[in-house]
Image (tube, rainbow, N blue to C red):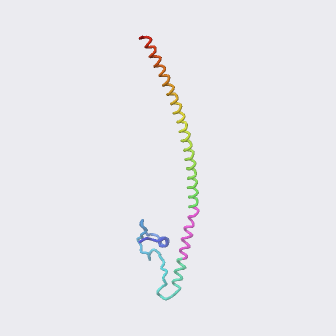
Amino acid sequence: MPSSFSTWANREGGSQTSWNGDSDRAPEEQGAVSLAPQADGDGDGGVEELKDALEAARRRLKYFEGFAPWIEEQMVAVVERASAISAENEREQQRIVEEIERQRGDVDQLTQEAERLREEAKSVVAEANATAEDVIG
């Protein structure tokens, strides 16, 4: 049986809840409050139960409100960390862009040098062929 927040918050120690919210105690043992009027005829019993339930709800609310500053601190830390990571990513992207541009420049320079060396090789081969023809011829 699924457990509600109310039954979870009202239970008094020792109860083990499984992952699906089922508890090892019956709902009436968990402190669940019945909102039906009591059968004994006195109308104050239902009002008292409601007052007790209200007081328990106020205690739970106060307990959980105690987490607010901690949650706020955690959220601030998460936002600051996300901002730092974002700035770091932007710097890294810019560094990569600069590296790519540098490498493109290197490729262009090497391509020009390769073309120059090809032309030089062609002229050396042509000169060697001419020299060889003069010698043979």
Q: Quadrant of the C terminus?
A: top left
Where is residue 103? Give x, y as percent: 52, 36
Q: Nearer the viewer, residue 83 or 45?
A: 83
Report if residue 69 lies within the magenta region: yes
Residue visible at 57% across and 64% down in the picture: 68
Where is residue 106? Give x, y as percent: 53, 33
Q: Nearer the viewer, residue 106 or 94?
A: 106
Q: Quadrant of the N terminus?
A: bottom left
Where is residue 61? Give x, y as percent: 55, 70
Q: Nearer the viewer, residue 107 or 96?
A: 107
Where is residue 49? Give x, y as percent: 52, 80
Residue visible at 52% across and 27% down in the picture: 113
Horizontal side of 14 relative to 89 (left or right) equals: left
Q: Nearer the viewer, residue 10 or 22?
A: 22
Residue 23: quarter of image = bottom left
Residue range in magenta is 54-70
